[in-house]
Image (cartoon, grey):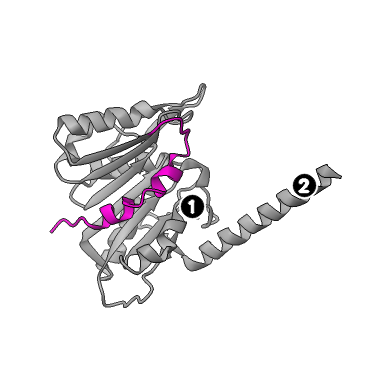
Amino acid sequence: MSGVYYFRKLTLLLSLFLIAQQAIAQQFEAKTFQTKDGHSLPYRVLLPEDYEATTQYPVILFLHGAGERGMDNEKQLTHGSKIFLEDSFRKKYPAIILFPQCPEDSYWASMTIDRTNYPIKTDFHYANKPNWPLQAARDLVDAWTDEGHIDADRIFVMGLSMGGMGTFESLIRWPKMFAAAAAICGGGDIRKAKRFAHRVPVWVFHGDADGVVPVRYSREMVQRLKDLHADVRYNEYPGVNHNSWDNAFAESELLPWLMMHSKS
């Protein structure tokens, strides 16, 4: 009897979770971006409440983690999308939020991953060209900017896990593009940190018990940025595993800090 009760309770909780996820997804419009070389990048967009097509808005490009890859144009909203729906953000910071989705056979960042043991070992090797999904995400922002919807001085990028790695690669490849960035449980090539160190303020987050992406990736990047006298903030959460995005999203100052920046 107790087993049936717990099964029903679990089923109910799962149903409520799925309903909540669908409610969130419905507020983000589903679109597809076609690249010049024939790729299709699914993405979701959240527009300001009183959106006007002739107004230029700040934009936040959000890069999801590896677990949310695919082509369903929904999984990428699993982590992080809810914070942009809160009244405290929407009413004070009218902004365009872009959630592209990376396909399962690729990554945002140019890297090879050894999953033989955990935490993983990652070799960042930024080639002449980025992986096509990252280039497409950048081109997506450019397309919205070219259409006159984006304030080019207030373009922000943030991401978690694989998306945190994509965030750092974006800063390294296009340091003049972004006004500020947030990288959660990610990492990047610290040898190239100088490219953005004096241009883009960054807030980095990681759990010190991360069993997937080693915390040293963030520690080393932050230390390198500090050595370069960059504008960098770092939150490390004791005892927190890979889901440090929960802690990061609970930081009341995260989005206000991001939105206060401008290149002008």
Quadrant of the frame with the C terminus: bottom left
Report the front residue among 99 and 140.
Answer: 99
Most extreme residue toward the right is: 1
Residue where numbered disc 1 is placed: 76
- Frontmost of labels 1 and 2 is 2
Provide the secondary structure element on which disc 2 rests.
helix
Give coordinates of residue 60: x percent, y percent.
33, 57
**Which contiguous range is marked in magenta?**
237-264
Residue where numbered disc 2 is placed: 7
Q: Does the magenta portion include 257?
A: yes
Most extreme residue toward the top is: 117
Q: Residue at x 30, y 63 (%)?
A: 143
Report the front residue among 63 and 206.
Answer: 206
Report the front residue among 179 and 195.
Answer: 179
Left or right: 252 with respect to 5?
left
Quadrant for residue 88, please give it: bottom left
Q: Does residue 5 appear anywhere in the picture?
A: yes
